[in-house]
Each structure stands twice: as C-alpha cells, then as structure tokens.
Image: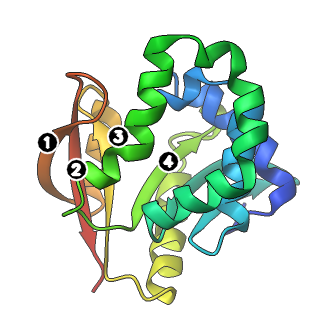
C-alpha cells in the first residue's frame, strides 16, 4: 500500500470512490464528471492537494484538502466554470440543487472567522476499510499541510455522520462550533492545530 500525493490522471478514480462511499453528502448527488473536474482542480491547484492510498496501481482511498477555500474556489471557477455548468445543466434547473451549490460556494464568506485551510473529504473503498488506511492518509495529509506552512485547519462534518465524527475526535480534532450550511441541517466544525 502506497500513501502519496494524487496525480491528475487519478481524478476520475477519486470521484468514483467519492460517489460510491459518501452517499449522504451533497457533492455525491452531483454528476461524476463534475466531481472528476473538482478533484482535477484540487490536484492541480496551488491552493489544494489530495493524498491517495494506492494498491496494485489503483486508488483505494483519498483525502482532499485546501490551503485557502476562497482561493481554491476562485481557481476552480476560473478554470472549470463553463464545462462544469454544462455538466450540471439538468441539475441547475433544480432549485434545491442550485441553492445548495451557492450555499457551498459562499459559506466561507458567511463563516469568515474560521480557518481558511480545510480538510474537504476523506473516503476509503469499502473492501479496504478497517485496515488503518484512513489514519495513514491523515498522517500524510497533516505532514503535507505542515510543509505548506499552515498552522491550523478545519473540517466540517454533518451532525448525522457519527463514524466520521468519531474518526476526527479520535485523531485529535477539537470541536469548535455548530453551523448550518444547507438549510437547517446541522454540521459540526472541528479544528486541527498543527504543533
């Protein structure tokens, strides 16, 4: 098992793991090609990165994060806006989905007192769960974020995602507060200070 930074050619595999393993998240409700664009942007932008776990040449897990959520969104919109709009065209006419897209894009402005760096997503293929892969990827993630001179980062996790909350608390995240990004759905904000 290799834990390393992702390559752009792996964005589609990462998007597939996201859609398969994260069933409750808003992003999972969007089309696969959109997620592939999102992870391509995360891998190539100077404001973000993605760590993967690879076995036999295939990605089996990943953890994605940004150094500055606002700058990353700016990069994504500049580079992928038009093709993403085309991919999401049928969904854009769904008011609820369009509203969630804007809520996701603009929550950093509303919550501007939070750290700009953020762990966005972590997922491991079902058949590889329970083997400590998430922990190994998280250690690599922290090492990478530290190398990029970030002193603290956050994660936002839905209140109903008990296994994720358990993982973050077990790995040293500190509860900061509750917020609501999408309607009245409660999420928890945790922070991770780098020593």
Mark 4 burial class by Cα count in 10 Å: few <14, some 14-19, many 20+:
some
Residue 126, percent across and down?
60, 31
Task: For marks 1 and 3, give the one nearer the viewer.
Answer: 1
Question: Could you tell me which secondary element the residue under label 2 belongs to?
Answer: strand
Side (left or right) of 115 relative to 31: left
Task: For marks 1 and 4, give the one nearer the viewer.
Answer: 1
Image height of 2 relative to 142, above or below: above
Q: Quadrant of the N terminus?
A: bottom right
Looking at marks 3 and 2 on the same chain, the residue that comes earlier in the sequence is marked by 3
Q: Which residue is mark 4?
A: 121
Residue 165, percent across and down?
27, 42
Q: Would you say residue 102 is visible in this rendering?
A: yes
The disc at residue 164 is: 3
Task: For marks 3 and 4, give the one nearer the viewer.
Answer: 4
Image height of 160 relative to 12, above or below: above
- How far separated are the C-alphas under marks 3 and 2? 12 Å
Q: Are marks 4 and 2 in contact (CB under 8 Å)?
A: no
Question: Could you tell me which secondary element the residue under label 4 belongs to?
Answer: strand
Mark 3 burial class by Cα count in 10 Å: few <14, some 14-19, many 20+:
some
Q: Which residue is mark 1?
A: 178
Residue at position x 44%, y 84% from top? 146
Residue at position x 40%, y 61% from top? 118
The disc at residue 189 is: 2
């Amino acid at each position: 098992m290799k834990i390393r930074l992702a390559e752009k050619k792996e964005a589609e595999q990462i998007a597939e793991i996201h859609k398969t393993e994260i069933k409750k998240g808003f992003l999972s409700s969007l089309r696969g090609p959109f997620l592939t664009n999102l992870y391509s942007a995360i891998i190539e932008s100077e404001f973000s990165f993605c760590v993967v776990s690879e076995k036999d040449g295939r990605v089996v897990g990943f953890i994605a994060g940004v150094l500055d959520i606002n700058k990353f969104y700016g990069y994504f919109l500049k580079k992928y806006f038009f093709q993403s709009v085309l991919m999401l065209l049928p969904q854009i006419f769904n008011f609820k989905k369009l509203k969630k897209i804007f809520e996701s894009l603009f929550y950093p402005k509303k919550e501007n007192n939070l750290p700009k760096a953020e762990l966005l997503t972590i997922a491991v293929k079902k058949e590889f769960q329970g083997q400590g892969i998430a922990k190994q990827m998280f250690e690599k993630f922290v090492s990478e974020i530290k190398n990029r001179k970030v002193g603290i980062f956050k994660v936002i996790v839905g209140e109903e995602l008990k296994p994720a909350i358990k993982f973050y608390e077990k790995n040293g995240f500190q509860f900061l507060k509750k917020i609501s990004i999408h309607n009245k759905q409660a999420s928890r904000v945790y922070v991770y200070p780098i020593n």
